[in-house]
Image: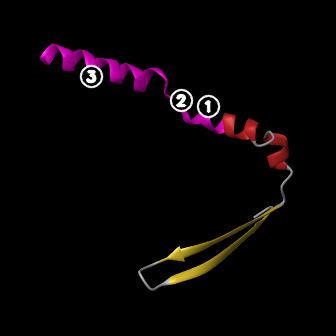
């Protein structure tokens, strides 16, 4: 029984380490999927909109504006 659990644990460790991606691979795949690095460099401004929830009864709407070069 102990041997079975040892083999099962080794198998799952192999699966998690054998197929993991590096941060560079994840970022490059994301850039490729969303149109490429040249398209991202073409953006001059970004607007982020959301809501911040601080507690049960507190929530605030947030707008963040970013524009190049800052």
Residue at x 29% of width, y 18% of height: 10
Q: Tag 2's secondary structure?
A: loop
Q: Residue furthest front?
A: 1
**Label 3 sits on residue:** 9
The quarter of the rendered structure image containing the C terminus is bottom right
Residue 25 - label? 1
Say if 10 sits above or below 42 in the image: above
Q: Which badge, 1 or 3, comes first in the chain's sequence?
A: 3
Q: Quadrant of residue 5?
A: top left
Q: Tag 3's secondary structure?
A: helix
How far apart in space, not on screen, are marks 2 and 3 (Cα)? 21 Å
Q: Residue furthest left?
A: 1
How far apart in space, not on screen, are marks 2 and 1 (Cα)? 6 Å
Q: Could you tell me if the residues under marks 2 and 1 are in contact, i.e. CB atoms within 8 Å? A: yes
Residue at x 41% of width, y 81% of height: 56
Label 2 environment density (alpha carbons within 10 Å; few <14, some 14–19, many ≥20):
few
Horizontally, is 59 left or right of 32 in the view? left
For the record, the magenta segment spans: 1-28
**Label 2 sits on residue:** 21
13 part of magenta stretch: yes
2 part of magenta stretch: yes
Label 3 environment density (alpha carbons within 10 Å; few <14, some 14–19, many ≥20):
few
């Amino acid at each position: 029984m102990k041997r079975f659990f040892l083999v099962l644990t080794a198998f799952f460790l192999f699966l998690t380490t054998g197929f993991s991606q590096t941060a560079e691979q994840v970022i490059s795949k994301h850039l490729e999927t969303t149109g490429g690095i040249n398209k991202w460099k073409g953006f001059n401004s970004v607007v982020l909109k959301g809501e911040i929830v601080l507690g049960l009864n507190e929530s605030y709407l947030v707008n963040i504006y970013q524009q190049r070069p800052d």
